[in-house]
């Protein structure tokens, strides 16, 4: 049992935290701008490399480099919106979806040109995990990632519930035309969406780098589970996306635990779990756990 | 308006380059520039570039035409490699393809593109046993020995290190499945015990679950058959952190400088690796390595540099021998320039080789990484080295033929 907690559950929650932070942006952009943003994974990558530059140049820890990560990703997101998505906003959303594929390739190629294609780490070597009560072993970076995600979730909840911008965002996600009639400045809301979505993606990207390594396909590889998490939580529901991300991360890690002596599923099928959850959900509960918008 | 100007500029560049490049012989280089093999690529690509330069400095190919490598990125994965190879064959109209690197990339691109289109493909690095028996109409070659052989040598190395019980973690692709299978069979037939044999998917963030299960199987060491940049380095790191294993055995995919960068040399002091290598008493090898380092500053000792040069050079010689870029004639010429008999030519002997071919003589290319005598399956015999960590890179401590 203790093995289950140490080597399946805690890594699962860590992975889930990363999916969760990425999925918030996917869900909000889907809810407010009405399109599936396929470049979101690459915004994560931009964030991870932003932090890497700060680590290299200033020699600070990746945690102190976080503002640089967020800055890089937010600027990238706002520029992409201005240059590629805004001109397409009045056309059917499929144009923007396809454009976001292109943006994903542009971002990744720029990263490859600027930082190279080799994978990098924030710091080399390895650390022994912390041991609690002689049984629970948890890597200190996992403690940090999980607690940071909790703090961010609470902050996000407070922002969406009590700030004016947050309330407007929820209104636009629920019904854009009604919100516009009510006098909400949608352009401003769109900017807020990009800032929050990109900032959280950047944080998630740095977390991936902290947990494993930084490479140019880092975000792209996580895109599918992030979409599954956003759908699971309900489109346009940021807290739903966080719940969805945690569920997918935990399930993905835990399915290979030998519950009944045998592995439930060979570890080589881990990646399929997000697919299966996504398909089952679209069939049986298309509005997601938190009653998001229907696609 | 701005857009129109930009578009016409792009068009002008495209047309301009098209006309400037009409008198050249193009060969594709299918590389995994991004993805799990990214760290291996710069020296491998430099080696291919050096072969390209040798041909052009030696007077060009097919009576003075320019020999050009067209480099594409297959991400060391199946589907992107198929796309990249089909770009080479259908758009760039290459005479032959050098690559891919990972077995999965090579097998997929050969099956979907090279074989149906009748294009010669020579891989410098793909070791999967599955390539031997492919129905390839003789279009697929490689210049490293099959993992049928590396698996046996690895089993021998592991037993020589007094390890009689090991667990095997292998990546679920053509490379991992191939060598893991041959290693297991050879190791067990020599008296070793495989306590756990677990396949895993590339690109995941945590392998702790699988590793915990394997650690409880009573193995003395973990055999990691994976690319360091894909899952290998994470597996080693997570094993060390959690105390699952402290001793590792790796194959060529793990022998990446990246592993030492990420883990540190101290923790890898007892780890050893098997990998295809070049013969150790080859005088042309030393000359080649000096030339390489003069040209690029460093990197001649990196994995698969020799093989990449040889594969590119063999393709160039085959085109010269065929006297045309006709793809099946190039394929037919490859064995003639690579295999004995014939006058021996080596790396950097391009002028001599061209002169011999012009006189109608038979040539036999003896490369940096071996003599490359292709059998009926397009395979070669070769050498496997045993490597250990030395500072921030690797050194070879034994060689098996």
Image (cartoon, coloured by chain):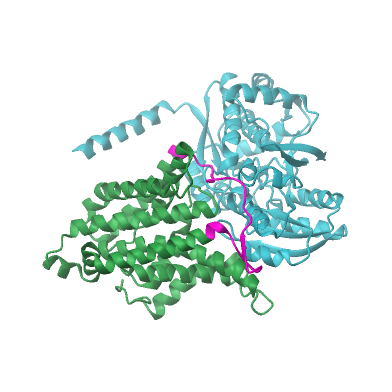
Chain colours: A green, B cyan
Main secondary-structure element of the magenta-colored stretch: loop
Q: Residue A224 falls in which quadrant of the image?
A: bottom left
* Along the viewing direction, whichever of B396 and A143 lies nearer the viewer: A143
Tell which residue pokes out farthest to the front in this image: A133
Query: In the visual, does A167 lie left or right of B353?
Result: left
Q: Position of residue B111 (x, y in %)?
A: 58, 52
Q: Position of residue B369 (x, y in %)?
A: 72, 34
Q: Is residue B394 above or below residue B209?
A: above
Q: Is residue B11 above or below residue A149?
A: above
Q: Is residue A216 visible?
A: yes
Region of the chain picked out in magenta, as a range: A114-142
Residue at image location 30% in from the left, 61% down from the top: A29
Query: In the visual, does A131 lie left or right of A105?
Result: right
Q: Is residue A27 visible?
A: no
Q: Position of residue B390 (x, y in %)?
A: 72, 37
Tell which residue pokes out farthest to the right in this image: B191
Residue at image location 31% in from the left, 46% down from the top: A75
Answer whether residue B41 is magenta in the image: no
Q: Position of residue B298 (x, y in %)?
A: 62, 28
- Image quadrant occupied by the N terminus of chain B: top left
């Amino acid at each position: 049992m203790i093995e289950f907690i140490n080597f399946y559950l805690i890594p699962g929650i860590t992975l889930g935290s990363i999916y969760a932070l990425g999925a918030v942006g996917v869900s909000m952009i889907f809810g407010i701008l009405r399109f599936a943003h396929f470049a979101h994974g690459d915004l994560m990558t931009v964030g991870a490399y932003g932090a890497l530059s700060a680590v290299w140049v200033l020699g600070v820890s990746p945690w102190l480099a976080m503002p640089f990560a967020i800055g890089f990703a937010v600027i990238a997101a706002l520029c992409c919106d201005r240059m590629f998505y805004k001109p397409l906003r009045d056309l059917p959303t499929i144009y923007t979806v396809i454009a976001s594929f292109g943006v994903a390739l542009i971002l990744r190629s720029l990263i490859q040109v600027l930082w190279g294609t080799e994978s990098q780490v924030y710091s080399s070597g390895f650390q022994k995990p912390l041991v609690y009560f002689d049984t629970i072993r948890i890597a200190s970076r996992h403690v940090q990632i999980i607690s940071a995600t909790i703090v961010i979730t609470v902050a996000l909840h407070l922002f969406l519930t009590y700030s004016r911008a947050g309330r407007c965002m929820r209104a636009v996600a629920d019904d854009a035309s009604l919100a516009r009639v009510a006098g909400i400045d949608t352009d401003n809301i769109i900017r807020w969406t990009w800032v929050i979505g990109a900032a959280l993606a950047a944080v998630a990207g740095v977390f991936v780098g902290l947990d494993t390594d930084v490479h140019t396909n880092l975000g792209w590889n996580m895109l599918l589970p992030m979409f599954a998490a956003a759908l699971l939580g309900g489109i346009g529901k940021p807290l739903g996306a966080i719940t969805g991300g945690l569920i997918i991360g935990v399930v993905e890690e835990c399915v290979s635990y030998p519950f009944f002596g045998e592995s439930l599923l060979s570890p080589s099928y881990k990646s399929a779990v997000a697919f299966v959850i996504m398909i089952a959900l679209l069939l049986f509960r298309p509005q997601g756990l938190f009653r998001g918008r229907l696609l | 308006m701005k857009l129109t100007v930009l578009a016409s500029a792009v068009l002008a560049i495209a047309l301009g380059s098209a006309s400037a490049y009409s008198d050249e012989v193009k060969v594709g280089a299918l590389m995994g520039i991004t993805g799990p093999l990214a760290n291996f690529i710069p020296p491998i690509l430099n080696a291919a570039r050096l072969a390209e330069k040798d041909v052009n400095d030696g007077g060009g190919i097919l009576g003075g035409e320019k020999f050009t490598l067209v480099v594409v990125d297959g991400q060391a994965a199946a589907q992107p490699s198929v796309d990249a190879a089909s770009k080479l064959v259908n758009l760039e109209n290459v005479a032959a393809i050098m690559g891919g690197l990972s077995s999965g990339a090579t097998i997929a691109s050969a099956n979907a593109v090279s074989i149906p289109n009748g294009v010669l493909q020579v891989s410098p690095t793909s070791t999967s046993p599955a390539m031997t028996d492919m129905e390839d109409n003789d279009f697929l070659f490689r210049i490293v020995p099959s993992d049928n052989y590396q698996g046996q040598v690895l089993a021998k190395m592991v037993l020589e290190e007094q390890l009689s019980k090991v667990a095997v973690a292998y990546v679920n692709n053509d490379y991992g499945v191939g060598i893991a299978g041959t290693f297991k069979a050879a190791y067990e037939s020599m008296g070793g015990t495989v306590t756990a044999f677990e396949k895993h998917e590339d690109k995941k963030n945590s392998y702790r679950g699988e590793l915990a299960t394997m650690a409880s199987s009573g193995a003395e060491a973990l055999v990691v058959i994976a690319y360091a940049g894909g899952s290998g380095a994470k597996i080693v790191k997570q094993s060390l952190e959690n105390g699952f294993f402290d001793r590792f055995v790796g194959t060529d995919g793990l022998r990446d400088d990246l592993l030492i960068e990420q883990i540190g040399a101290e923790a890898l002091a007892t780890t050893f690796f098997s990998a295809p290598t070049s013969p150790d008493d080859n005088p042309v090898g030393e000359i080649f390595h000096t030339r390489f380092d003069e040209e690029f500053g460093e990197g001649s000792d990196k994995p698969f540099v020799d093989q990449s040069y040889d594969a590119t050079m063999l393709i160039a010689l085959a085109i010269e021998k065929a006297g045309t870029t006709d793809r099946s004639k190039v394929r037919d010429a490859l064995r003639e320039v690579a295999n004995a008999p014939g006058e021996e030519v080596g790396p950097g002997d391009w002028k001599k080789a061209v002169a011999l071919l012009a006189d109608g003589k038979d040539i036999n290319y003896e490369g940096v990484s071996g003599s490359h005598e292709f059998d009926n399956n397009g395979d070669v015999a070769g050498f496997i080295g045993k490597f250990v960590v030395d500072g921030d890179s690797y050194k070879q401590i034994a060689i098996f033929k």
